[in-house]
Amino acid sequence: MSIRITGTGLYTPPESISNEELVESLNAYVEHYNQQNAAEIEAGILTPKRGSSAPFIQKVSGIKSRYVVNKEGVLDPKRMTPIIPERANEEWSIQAEMGTAAARQAIENAGLTPDDIDAVILACSNMQRAYPAVAIEIQAALGMTHGYAFDMNVACSAATFGLQQAVDAIKAGSARRVLVVNAEITSGHLNWTDYSSHFIFGDVATAIVVEDTNSKPGFEVLGTQLLTQFSNNIRNNFGFLNRGDESGVGKADKLFVQNGQKVYREVSPLVAKTITEHLGKLGLNVEDVKRYWLHQANENMNQFILKMILGKDTERERAPIILDEYANTSSAGSIIAFHKHSKDLLDGDLGVICSFGAGYSIGSIIVKKVS
């Protein structure tokens, strides 16, 4: 048995927001908010909102822009959230639509048809609804006539956790080919009025085909390793029980919140240790790895992790960065990096796909190029 990644796909929304555009919108909102609430701020009842700048965003994160499903609503200082009209149940949902677009590309790149796929896993940080599973909707949108599908959420680590589920399903014999989809509409869970986090996320969808084959080129999965450790430092309290306490509805904790400095300090060494130990279990050394496709949250964080792994600074092409254009796309980030920066590898070259985030959660997938 040789389990390989044989195709990937990427759907990028048509609208992009630069740091400059984002800051202009935030600062207009902040000025209006502080003026409207001047008395309460002066009395110490409210805390004044803070503005930002494009150079600050790029310095602390490496992000220059991000793609979104709707630009108008995000940049409207009177709204500060995307405009996403509800669709009738008879229409494909926006998340399924994005996921299906990426999935079709991945299936085509794998030289397959939708009915060659046995299972669909939608692995991402936010589901559009509780049920029915959006993965089943994607299965239907693809026109599949057999197989099964399900949703799973491990926040930013969902893609690598989904890849392990795909590998395990193939090993167990319940599927021969599995499609893992990461459709992320992060603009919907982001507090666009918060200077410390408003720039972090972007929308996108990726897809990966995993199959058992000894004849097709791709990336053989040599091993998978997952780790979770509970933390409140990245959290979103939105859920169906919110309506049980009206006092909490609409509060900031019902969107993405984090303690970024703690996350940086605590997660970075965990990631470095996980990757190093995982390679060691397979009899491999960190220097054997040609390419590291890391979660795309923060460029400074990735450089820090790589320095802990390798003991030195490394060239950018060894650990490609896509967050400058896409921002943090949650589970999809490492897969975008893999999709865009894997074709140049040669037969036998080793790579690590690693994602990490809320939970805490870390997933490491070690692969080898097979021509």
Image (cartoon, helix red, strand yellow):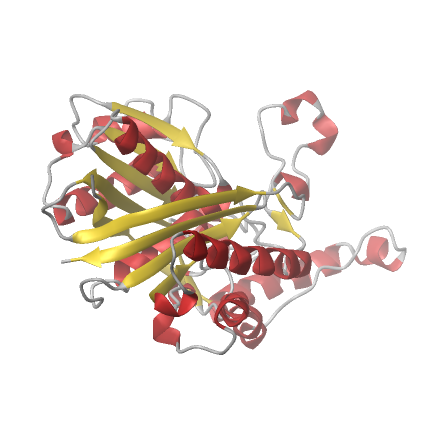
Relative depth, front residue between 189 and 366: 366
> On the rendered structure, is 15 left or right of 35?
left
Q: Position of residue 137 (x, y in %)?
A: 29, 27
Q: In what quadrant of the picture does the N terminus appear?
A: top left
Q: Is residue 321 above or below residue 367?
A: below
Q: Residue at x 37, y 55 (%)?
A: 353
Count of numbered labels shown in the rendering: 0
For this orientation, the residue located farthest to the right is 43
Q: Is residue 337 visible?
A: no
> On the rendered structure, is 259 left or right of 349?
right
- Quadrant in the picture for residue 124: top left
- Quadrant in the picture for residue 182: top left
Relative depth, front residue between 354 and 79: 354
Q: Is residue 317 above or below residue 182?
A: below
Q: Residue at x 18, y 63 (%)?
A: 347
Q: Is residue 27 above or below residue 317?
A: above
Q: Is residue 193 visible?
A: yes
> On the rendered structure, is 192 left or right of 280?
right
Q: Residue at x 26, y 29 (%)?
A: 119
Q: Position of residue 209 (x, y in %)?
A: 23, 42
Relative depth, front residue between 24 and 302: 302
Q: Position of residue 136 (x, y in %)?
A: 30, 25
Relative depth, front residue between 25 and 369: 369
Q: Residue at x 86, y 50 (%)?
A: 45
Q: In what quadrant of the picture does the C terminus appear?
A: bottom left
For this orientation, the residue located farthest to the front is 283
Q: Position of residue 370 (x, y in %)?
A: 18, 56
